[in-house]
Image (tube, helix red, strand yellow):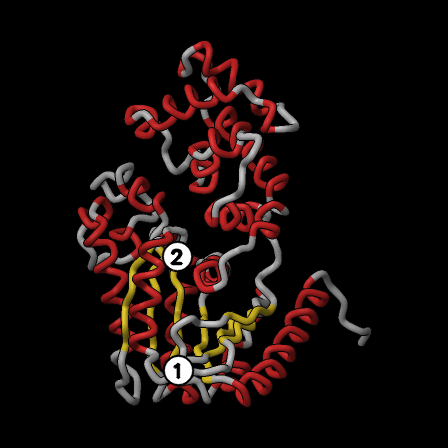
Amino acid sequence: MGKRTGPGLPSATAASSQIDEILENAKTAQRKTTTILVLGLPGSGKTTFLRHLKMIYEPYTETERIQWINVIQGNLTNAFCALLAALANESFYPPPIFAYIQEASSSSQASLLCPTTTRLFANWFSAVNTQLTLTPLMLEARTIHFLTRAPEITQIDYLPSDLDILFSQIESESEPLAEAEIHVPFASTIRPTSLICVCPRQSLISAHKWLPIFAYVRDVVFVVNVLEYDSATNMKMTFDFFDQICHNPAFFKTNIHILMNIPTTFRRKLTLTTTSAPPGSLNTLYPDVPADYDSDEVKVLKSLRDRFLSIARRRKYLTRVYIHAVDLVESQPMRVLMASFMDTFRDSLAWGCYMT
């Protein structure tokens, strides 16, 4: 029999290599820190969570912010292009606004756009009627962010904000955060907070093999993107992965923190959902869930929470399960969340985070 070949082998080999890297980093961090394991499916928001965490505890310097200006201005141009693509009907725009958007979408240098017209656009874009028209199927949160920030981004003396940089990292679809050290200001220890993040997409298949690597961790943070609540495939993968974590012998005595990532577009998505239980709705996926749950944010979150808790309650050892809900790109809620985490991790003033 010939040697097996196929398009899946390179990615599988790369995933295996990354898992080996996880193991090596785990051994190193185990000697230096108390470890908190951060898990979740690709796209759950793990990278955003860790980048925002770094942003909070190690703010960007002026030099670092300046380095992002060209990228952010390019993202603003892309945002104008996305707006035109989503709302191609010229009659939707006031004539001066439409002419400005056409100019902005083809501009190679955002700082050359007219400040006065940019402000007029921002006022129009922020109008309530306009926002109600921009459904989540049309514009993503990062696109809305850049369009809202247009007056600031087009200034000659513009200096990027934390969220400008965070959304640019999301926009660029850059590689997962590889490794970083964060010094927690209120920690009474000189040991740094180590964040080591590896995210092999193939790793879910072999999770039962590499999860025991982290048997020494005391807490697991499981990140869930609730925007995918009506996706049967993604939610099944999410619940199955969570079930593996809960019932892996390595984590029988480990506290679990379910971090429900609630993007702004989640609430807007619910406003489009009717009680007729369209294909992919909660009622279709889970017959025991009433049809009217699809249009109620609290009920959707409660349904997901109850399913996670039902899995957790079947654990051999009933350890603590915490549930947090937050938009991972909102700064103040994230600060409150981290304060809550630090209260929970009272004895873990220096901790490492691994992502898979």
Residue 202 in sight in this render: no
Q: Secondary structure at mark 2?
A: strand
- The picture quadrant where one finds residue 13 is bottom right
- The picture quadrant where one finds residue 210 is bottom right
Position in image of residue 30 (x %, y %): 53, 87
Dot 2 surroundings within 10 Å: few (below 14), some, or many (20 or more)?
many
Q: Nearer the viewer, residue 164 or 184?
A: 184
Whole-angstrom CA distance, mark 2 to mark 1, is 26 Å
Position in image of residue 93 (x %, y %): 42, 15
Dot 1 surroundings within 10 Å: few (below 14), some, or many (20 or more)?
some
Q: Which residue of the protein is positioned furthest toward the right in this rendering?
A: 2
Q: Amino acid at mark 1?
A: Ser
Q: Nearer the viewer, residue 97 or 57?
A: 57
Question: Looking at the image, is 331 positioned above or below residue 152?
Answer: below
| Rendered residue at 57%/50% (across/down) | 62
Residue 50 placement, left or right of 225: right
Question: Looking at the image, is 260 positioned above or below residue 205?
Answer: above
Task: Return the residue at label 2.
Answer: 225
| Rendered residue at 71%/67% (across/down) | 9
Q: Earlier in the sequence, mark 2 or mark 1?
A: 2
Task: Return the residue at label 1.
Answer: 348
Q: Secondary structure at mark 1?
A: loop
- The picture quadrant where one finds residue 240 is bottom left
Closer to viewer: mark 2 or mark 1 = 1
| Rendered residue at 56%/67% (across/down) | 199
Position in image of residue 87 (x %, y %): 45, 23
